[in-house]
Image (cartoon, grey):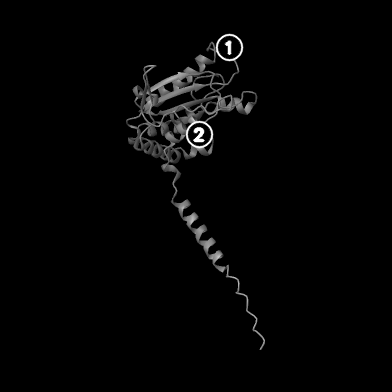
C-alpha cells in the first residue's frame, strides 16, 4: 500500500500586520495631538540647551546645574533653574505674547524668542527708529507700544522684572551725529523705549536698561541683512536668576 504524502503546513497569514501598522500610526497621531508646545518650560529648555552646547574645542562645556547648590571654594551660589510653576507661567506669558503681538509678528516688526535669561521680545530698530537716531517713530509704532505696555502690566507678569537692551551693528555713527559712538546710541534707544512705555502705564521701577553697541550681534555684520537684524532693541522678561 502506497504511503500518503504529508502536506506541508500552510504559511501563517500576514494580514494582521496591516491592521497592526494602522493601529500604531493612529496611536502616534493621537499622542502628537495631545502634545501642546505652549506648555513647555521654555526657560528650563533654553538652559538645558545652553548646558549641552560645545565650546570652541568641540567639547561639551556643561556646568549648568538642575538644582540649587553652593560653590564653597568660590563663595558663590549656583543659580538653580526655575521651578515647574515658574516655567509654566513663563510659557503662558509667551503664549499670550504670541497672540497679542500677532499683527507685529506678521510684519516682522517684532520677534519673540526665549533663552536662559527669560522671554525676549525683539523690536526691529529700523522700524522704530530712523537711521542713527534714538527718537522713536511714534506715529507708526504707537499701536505696538500700546500693546507692549498692555502686556507688561498684565497679571501674568505682575511679579516679574524686565530689562531693555539696545544693540547696533558695527557701522560707526555719522560725523554729524549727536552720539559719540554706538554705545551712547544703543543706550539712548533703550531708554527712550522705556520712557514711552512708562507714558503708557508701565511701572518703570520694574525695568533696567543697558546699551551693548555692536558687542552682541545675532548675525554676521558682513551683509546688509545681518546688520539689519543686529540693529535691535531687546525687551527681556527676566528669569529670577537674572534679576
Of tags 2 and 1, which is closer to the observer? 2
Asked if the residue at tag 1 contacts the one at tag 2, i.e. Cβ–Cβ closer than 8 Å, the answer is no
In what element is the residue under mark 2?
Answer: strand
Q: Residue furthest bottom?
A: 1
Q: Is residue 34 left or right of residue 218?
A: left
Q: What label does residue 111 carry, if any? A: 2
Q: Is residue 68 left or right of residue 10?
A: left
Q: Give the x, y percent position of residue 54.
A: 55, 28
Depicted 168 relative to depicted 84: above or below: above
C-alpha gap between disc 2 and disc 1: 32 Å
Q: Which residue is mark 1?
A: 176
Q: Give the x, y percent position of residue 2.
A: 67, 86
Q: Residue furthest right?
A: 2
Of residue 80 and residue 194, the one placed in the foreground of this image is 80
Depicted 137 relative to depicted 91: above or below: above
Q: Is residue 226 left or right of residue 96?
A: right
Q: What label does residue 134 carry, if any? A: none
Which tag, 2 or 1, sits closer to the chain's start?
2
* Label 2, residues with CA under 10 Å away: few <14, some 14-19, many ≥20: some
In what element is the residue under mark 1?
Answer: loop
Residue 13 quadrant:
bottom right
Q: Give the x, y percent position of residue 221.
A: 62, 23
* Residue at the image position 59 percent from the left and 14 percent from the top: 174
Q: Quarter holding the N terminus?
A: bottom right
Residue 6 quadrant:
bottom right
Q: Give the x, y percent position of residue 156.
A: 34, 36
* Label 1, residues with CA under 10 Å away: few <14, some 14-19, many ≥20: few
Depicted 34 relative to depicted 200: above or below: below
Q: Residue furthest front?
A: 1
Q: Quarter holding the C terminus?
A: top left
Amino acid at each position: 500500500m502506497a504511503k500518503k504524502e504529508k502536506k506541508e503546513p500552510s504559511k501563517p497569514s500576514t494580514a494582521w500586520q496591516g491592521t497592526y501598522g494602522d493601529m500604531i500610526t493612529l496611536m502616534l497621531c493621537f499622542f502628537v495631538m495631545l502634545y501642546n508646545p505652549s506648555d513647555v518650560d521654555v526657560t528650563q529648555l533654553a538652559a538645558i540647551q545652553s548646558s549641552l552646547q560645545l565650546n570652541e574645542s568641540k567639547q561639551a562645556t556643561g556646568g549648568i546645574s538642575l538644582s540649587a547648590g553652593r560653590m564653597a571654594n568660590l563663595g558663590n551660589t549656583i543659580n538653580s533653574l526655575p521651578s515647574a510653576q515658574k516655567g509654566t507661567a513663563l510659557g503662558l506669558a509667551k503664549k499670550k505674547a504670541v497672540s497679542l503681538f500677532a499683527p507685529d509678528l506678521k510684519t516682522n516688526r517684532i520677534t519673540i524668542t526665549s533663552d536662559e535669561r527669560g522671554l525676549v521680545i525683539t523690536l526691529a530698530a529700523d522700524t522704530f527708529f530712523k537711521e542713527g537716531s534714538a527718537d522713536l517713530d511714534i506715529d507708526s509704532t504707537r499701536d505696538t507700544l500700546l500693546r507692549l505696555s498692555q502686556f507688561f502690566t498684565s497679571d501674568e507678569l505682575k511679579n516679574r522684572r524686565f530689562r531693555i537692551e539696545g544693540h547696533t551693528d558695527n557701522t560707526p555713527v555719522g560725523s554729524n551725529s549727536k552720539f559719540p559712538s554706538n554705545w551712547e546710541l544703543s543706550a539712548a534707544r533703550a531708554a527712550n523705549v522705556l520712557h514711552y512705555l512708562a507714558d503708557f502705564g508701565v511701572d518703570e521701577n520694574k525695568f533696567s536698561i543697558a546699551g551693548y553697541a555692536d558687542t552682541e550681534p545675532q548675525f554676521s555684520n558682513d551683509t546688509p541683512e545681518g546688520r539689519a537684524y543686529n540693529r535691535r532693541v531687546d525687551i527681556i522678561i527676566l528669569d529670577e536668576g537674572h534679576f
